[in-house]
Image (cartoon, rainbow, N blue to C red):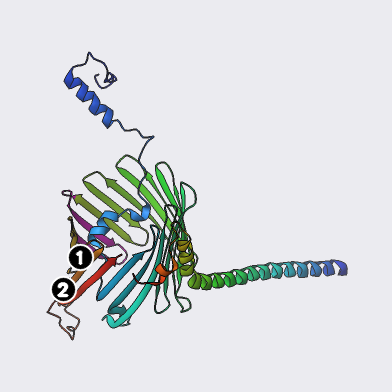
Amino acid sequence: MTGLVPPPPISSSTSTAPATTNTAKMEEERVDYMNLPCPIPYEEIHREALMSLKPELFEGMRFDFTKGLNQKFSLSHSVFMGPTEIPSQSSETIKIPTAHYEFGANFIDPKLMLFGRILTDGRLNARLKCDLTENLALKANAQLTNEPHMSHGMVNFDYKGKDYRTQFQLGNGALFGANYIQSVTPHLSLGGEVFWAGQHRKSGIGYAARYNTDKMVATGQIASTGMVALSYVQKVSEKVSLASDLMYNYMSRDVTASFGYDYILRQCHLRGKIDSNGCTAAFLEERLNMGLNFILSAEVRINSCFPLSCNNPPPLRNKTSPNLLFYPAQLISEH
Amino acid sequence: MASRVALKGKGKTTKGSKASDDRSTAKCLKEWSTWTLKKAKVIAHYGFIPLVIVIGMNSEPKPQLSQLLSPV
C-alpha cells in the first residue's frame, strides 16, 4: 500500500528528517531513462581490461624524440634496434635483428588530427580523425608499403547520438562492417556488430555487453567467429586496479585466462600479468624528468614439456628450462 | 514464318549485345575504379607526410622553417 503512494516532495517542511533522507534516496534511485549517458565506443568496450592485461610489450631498444613546433604540430624521430619476428612454416618463431629509423609528423587540433609515421623501408603508417559535424566523425587508418598487395586501409564513419553510438566501416579487400551500442540503464550498455569480408569470403556477427560502476567494469563479448571474451576489472583504490579476462574460442576449443594488475603511481605506471599459457609479463613506465620517460618491459614464457598423448613418440627436444625473453629499455623524450 | 524466325533471331542478337554492353560497362567501371585506387594509394604514400607538414607549418602560431630542420 505504501508503495503505491507517491513520495511527498522534499521541500515539504512537515516531513521529518528520516523521511526526507528516504525521499532523497528514492529520487536518486528513480532512473531517468530519457537522459542516459552516452556509451563508450564499441571498439573500446574492453578498454580498462586491455590497459592492464595487454601492455605494449616490445623487444630490443628504442629511442623516441618528439619535438613540438607549436601547440598543435610536432615532429618525431625514433630509432629502434631489436629482433623482429618473421613468419615461418615451422612452429619455431624466427627472429632476425633489425634496426630502423622512423620519422613522424603529428597535427592535433580539436577538429582534425593527423598522424603519420614513415620508416626507412618505405612503410607508411597514417591516421586521420576529423569531426565533420558535432556528432559525426570520420576516422581513417592506413598502412601503405611498397610491396604490392600488402597495403591496408580502413575508413570509419562514427555517429554519436544522445545515448547510442553507431559506426560504419569500409576497408580494402571489400571489407564492410557496422556496429551499434546503446545505453540501456545508467550502468549497462549493450551493442552488436556485423562485418563482411569480401576477399576472404567471411562474414560475422557479434554482441557485446558492458556493465560499469565507479568501482568495477564487467564486459562480455561473443562473436560468430567462435570467440567469447569476458573480462572483469575492479578498481581497488585510486591507484590500484586488478583485472581478469577469459578468452574462449568455441570453434577451436582454445581457452586462455589471464589475471593482471595496474598501479598508477605519481612517477610511474606499473602493469603486470600472468596467463594460463604460462606467460608472465611486466611493464614499467617511469617519468624520470619532465619530458623524459623510461620504459622497461619483460616477458617470461614457460613451455610445457609433457607430450600430449602416449601413442605419439616423445618430442625430440624436451624444453625443461623456461624460455626467457627479456625486452630491455625504451627511452622516450619529449622536447 | 520465316519472318518470325528472323525476328526471333534479331531479338536474340539485340539481347545478347545489350548483355555484353552491360558487362563491358561494369568491366570498364571496375577497371576505372581500380586505376583510381592505385593512383590514390601512390598519392597517399608520397604525399601524406608532406601534407601534414604543410598544414602544421600554416597553423597559428606559425613556426619558422629553421625549427623544422634543426634538432633543437
Residue A263 picture location, percent across and down:
17, 56
Residue A199 in sight in this render: no
What stretch of residues is rendered in magenta?
A: A235-259
From this viewpoint, which residue is outermost toward the left? A320
Query: In the displayed structure, does residue A319 sit left or right of residue A110?
Result: left
Name the main secondary structure of what is drawn in magenta.
strand
Please, what secondary structure does the residue beneath circle 1 have? strand
Q: Is residue A6 above or below residue A266?
A: above
Instruction: Examine the structure image and report whether residue B60 is included in the region drawn in magenta.
Output: no
Residue A269 in sight in this render: yes
Q: Which mark is residue A283?
A: 1
Q: Which quadrant holds residue A244?
A: bottom left
Which of the pair A242/A122 is nearer the observer?
A122
Q: CA distance from mark 2 to mark 1?
A: 18 Å
Residue A72 picture location, percent across and down:
40, 58
Q: Is residue A182 above or below residue A295?
A: above
